Amino acid sequence: MKKLILILSSLLIVASAYSFSFSNLAKKVADTASTIAENDTTKALSAKQENALAKYKQSKEEFLKGFSIIADALGATDLKKQADDALAKVEAQTVKTLDVETVTQVADEVIAKAKADTTASDVAKSASDVVKAKYEEAMSYFKKAIEGEVETAKVVADVATQARDAMKNAETSGEKIKIASTLKPSMELAKTIPDDISKSKEAVLAILQKIKANGATLSSDLLDSLKK
């Protein structure tokens, strides 16, 4: 994970090298970028970025489904509603226009609610077999969510490396602007996903602590994912 963070930082360096264009001439840059045709390099990077965004969106959906299921099992109605509402917002977005900031924010709000909720501790003490089965179902979603975020980080790191090289080899400032504009979502992901993965793991561990001593069988695969 540390290696991924270092690679992701390279994409931020690429962005900062052209920060003047983005901070002071944002509209002009956007207008300019829209008139520049994509070359093969930009198209390839754009396709990889779309793959990363698709993985990120799916991982957040899995994460929120897990929280909805476990909130239902624990009788935490407010948490379930918040998880369901957040899930609807994420599912309503498309990969091509994915708002990374909004997706991250609604998931973070569910995490904060889950950590603050006290219902889980009370209900878990008398968990029935049905409830325990829901624990397991939720854990499977959490496992897929965490693995999906780690895979997203790998793709974004790959995009970062290639974007850095593409910037170096670009022959015109227009090409550089096009690359930077096209990869803006990846820049947002590069800034957020390392911390995002940590927060997701912390949230799952917080839930595990509430149910571990109350009859739930914890998946070794999930525990392995949390250690990575």
Image (tube, helix red, strand yellow):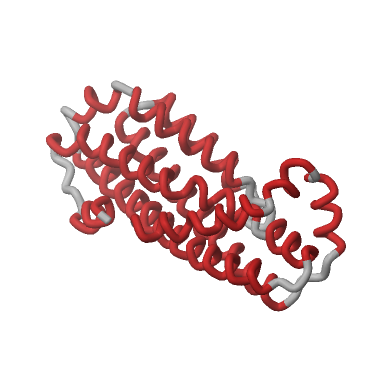
Q: Is residue 201 above or below residue 167?
A: above
Residue at the location (47% across, 31% down)? 109
The answer to whether residue 204 is left or right of residue 153 is left
Q: Is residue 125 left or right of residue 101?
A: left
Which residue is depicted at the point 25% across and 41% down? 130
Which quarter of the figure has residue 42?
Answer: bottom right
Marker count (numbered): 0
Which of the pair 132/100 is nearer the observer? 100
Q: Is residue 95 left or right of residue 119?
A: right
Depicted 71 relative to depicted 90: above or below: above
Depth order, front residue of 158/90? 158
Image quadrant holding the N terminus, namely bottom left
Residue found at x 59% / y 71%? 165
Query: Height in image: 33 above or below 26?
Result: below
**Residue at x 87%, y 62% (from the top left corner):** 35
For the C terminus, the image quarter is bottom left
- Residue 96 screen position, x and y as percent: 67, 57
Which is nearer the eye, 59 or 67? 59
Q: Position of residue 87 (x, y in %)?
A: 52, 42
